Image: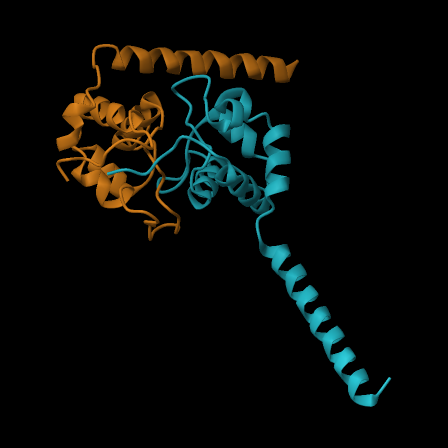
Amino acid sequence: MNNFVGKCAVIAALSGLAGFATQASADVVGNAKAAEGKVAMCIGCHGIPGYRTAYPEVYEVPMLGGQNAQYIANALHAYKKGDRHFDTMRAIATTLSDQDIADIAAYYAAQTPQSKNNPDK
Amino acid sequence: MKPSKALHTSFKAACAAAALIGMTVGAAHAADVSNGKALSDSHNCAACHGPGLNKPVSGEYPRLAGQHASYIYWALRQYQIGGNNPNFGRNNAIMAAQVQSLSQSDLKDLAAYIESLDGSLVLKK
């Protein structure tokens, strides 16, 4: 019974969160082309094969190409707000507007094995 | 059997035994992909992250197949740590519940399994 109530509470909370996220991004449409000039700070780590972080844990930075746009946008908003913790990502995300975040998310989501590397870089 | 041949045979046997011991010790430290698959199935990862963990059912959830194991391990570890620490941790009700009962070596096995999957993630500039 308690378990059932707990599940309902989690579902209700998540529905609320999902609703908020949808609302927040409803008026911003990502433009992958516009992001070509905005990803210079991303590719210094995410564009280098095998690139690893140094602190607080050593791990390979995630591959972003082909990732879901909404997931990337949510992650960037969470870094900006401080809900996700990684100093470098926080520093970068705080410089991004909602439009920048939507553009960058669309840019990475659109990548496939056939995509050319960024012509600006 | 000539003494020299007997010596040779026992030397070979000793080498084989040493190699076997080496393999066993090595295996104890390496991530176990088959345990990772078993954990992925029992925790129903595909219910959200999709078939092959490559087609999430919602854009809110990440595509996982082929992602770097060291990153997946750290992400899972952060869900275990939760959202109360100002420097580490991720706050996500679903993932926190999923990883709560897993050991560090379970997390590494899961990460190795996820990295071993063919997926559509790519590294581009």
In this rendered view, identify the residue nearer to me: A59 or A90.
Answer: A59
Q: Identify whether B97 is placed above or below B77.
A: above
Percent position of residue B33, x then y: 59, 43
Chain B palette colour: cyan
Which chain shows up in orange?
Answer: A
Percent position of residue B65, x then y: 47, 33
Q: Identify whether A49 is placed above or below A85.
A: below
Q: Identify whether B108 is placed above or below A81.
A: below
Give the residue at x 23% y 22%: A102
Percent position of residue A24, x then y: 26, 14
Percent position of residue A21, x then y: 32, 16
Colour theme: by chain
Left or right: where B122 falls relative to B9: left
Given the current orientation, which residue lies at the most extreme right position? Answer: B1
Left or right: where B88 falls relative to B32: left
Q: How many marks?
A: 0
